Image: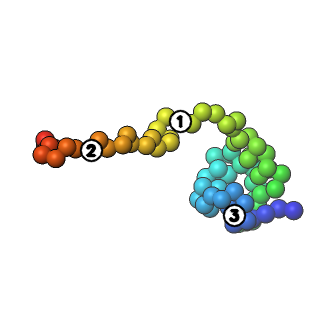
Amino acid sequence: MLMDVLAATRELGVGQSTLRRWIREGRLPAVRLGRRVLLRPEALERFVRAAERPPGPPKRGCLKQQAPAAQARQPGQEKNL
């Protein structure tokens, strides 16, 4: 059974313009019937499998680091600006 672009975007969680770009670039095979663009579920599954990456270490700056605890100022100490 073939699915239309709208059903495929819901399945992948991407917008129609992104899906149509992938089709135009040849990254995702599609069947054109007249003006309709249809996709095979198997092609969608292969596309997702090809995009999978093994989990690796987080990228630098990806995780927020907690700021060090603020040091308490002594009375009478002013912050120099």
Residue appearing at x 62%, y 61% in the figure: 16
Q: Earlier in the sequence, mark 3 or mark 1?
A: 3
Give, as a three-letter code, the residue at label 1: Lys
User: How busy is the neighbourhood of tag 3: few (under 14 within 10 Å), some, or many (20 plus)?
Assistant: few
Residue appearing at x 73%, y 47% in the figure: 48
Residue 57 in percent (x, y) is at 60, 33
Give, as a three-letter code, the residue at label 3: Arg
Q: Hey, which quadrant is residue 15 in on the image? A: bottom right
Q: Nearer the viewer, residue 67 or 50?
A: 67
Taking the image as shown, residue 73 lies to the left or right of residue 65, namely left
Taking the image as shown, residue 38 lies to the left or right of residue 24, namely right
Q: Which residue is mark 1?
A: 59
Residue appearing at x 43%, y 43% in the figure: 66
Q: Earlier in the sequence, mark 3 or mark 2?
A: 3
Residue 3 in percent (x, y) is at 79, 63
Query: For residue 10, which numbered disc appears in the image?
Result: 3
Kindly indicate whether the residue at mark 1 contacts the one at mark 3 (C-beta within 8 angstroms). Answer: no
Give, as a three-letter code, the residue at label 2: Ala
